[in-house]
Image (cartoon, grey):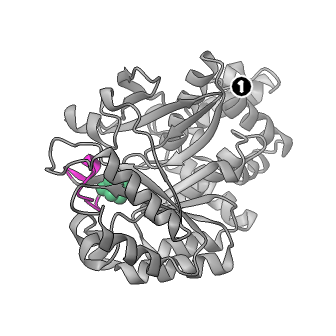
Amino acid sequence: MSSLIIVTIVFVILANTQKSKMSLPDIRNFSYEELLAYMKSIGESAFRAGQIFEWIYQKQVKHFSQMTNLSSHLQKRLQSDFVFFEPKVGEKQISSDGTTKILFDLNDNEKIETVLIPVKSRTTVCISTQAGCKFGCKFCASGIGGWKRNLSVAEIMNQVLYVKEEAQKHDNPLSHIVFMGVGEPLDNFSNLMKAIRIINHKKGINIGARRITVSTCGVIPNILQLGREGLQIELAISLHGYDNESRDVLMPVNKKYPFDDLIQACKDYQRNYRRQITFEYILIKGVTCSEKAIKALKKAFKGLICKMNLIPYNPVLEFNHKTPSRQDMFKFRDQLKSFGIHATIRSPRGQDIAAACGQLRIKKK
Ligand code: SF4
């Protein structure tokens, strides 16, 4: 983006938000490049943008007066142009395995969930990108009640910063980010990309692109767009079916973006961008866990560099599906392996706190 366009965007944002403190923009909505442009526009040196990024994302301060290497003049200017909106924690549940689910109340009373998942010496955070979801996957509580709105970059970054602070308290630094919470990340594409660039930025959260995973239900045009962004991030596809008929059962999105087109899009994505794709596949008794499924998957994955993440179905009260027996799940995994498909069964985490996507949010509606 040219700096002229960025300066214009900054001025439009500021011009629209001078009326009252409440209408000022959260500074965490701004990319590094936009902050650079803002600094230029107020006659400050470019390196100030990096200092501010470090204060926000590395030292995690929430007030401009704490940015002690900035002049008091600049601190005051920032205070008059921006705010920090603090997320309100509506509820926090901690599982016996350490998985922590946080329900945030947003300024307009929408609710989103963020999940902190500690595994050995690392911490992963599962981030929401929308309030509600329009895709209505049948195993997921996030789509119940429909889509309300996209989250802003600041609302996405608030989740990351909150969990970063929590993880530090337990000496388990935040190391991995997965966009797999409430909402379809690729349906909020520009805010997602901006947040990823802040997370990945050396003066931002500074987490390597390969430790960032974006999960999609299969929004084909945006998968292809993601491939053109030139980021070394991981892509996960919620497949949950082995052909059109079986995928239709769980994934209404399959009507718009059918199974074969999705697999072809993955192949196109991989042609430009040779990174392994992860297929998320929920094992549901009598629906996705069968001999027929294995044969179809073997055929579909020919020529793809991929792995399968097999997820035992995590019961959601609103839906009437069942988890297969352990024996059936292991058999399914081993058959896939025998065809050369790398497959692992994900251990369920946080079951005692309903950590599956959208469950806590629905309970609180
Ligand atoms: S799985 Fe993802 S895309 Fe599907 S309903 Fe849930 S949040 Fe939406």
Which residue shows up at 85% across the image and 42% down it?
47
User: Is residue 364 rendered to the left or right of residue 340?
Assistant: left
Query: Quarter for ligand 1?
Result: bottom left
Picture quadrant where residue 9 is located = bottom right
Q: Is residue 273 above or below residue 48?
A: below
Could you say whether the residue bearing mark 1 is in a helix, strand or loop?
loop
Q: Main secondary structure of the magenta part?
A: loop
Q: Residue furthest top?
A: 169
Residue 111, percent from left and from top = 31, 37
Q: Quadrant of the N terminus?
A: bottom right
Residue at x 38% of width, y 77% of height: 296
Position of residue 139 in the picture relative to residue 356 (left or right): left
The image quadrant that residue 2 belongs to is bottom right
Query: Magenta region: which residues?
Result: 134-145
**Can residue 18 be seen in this snapshot?**
no
Report the front residue among 190 and 178: 178
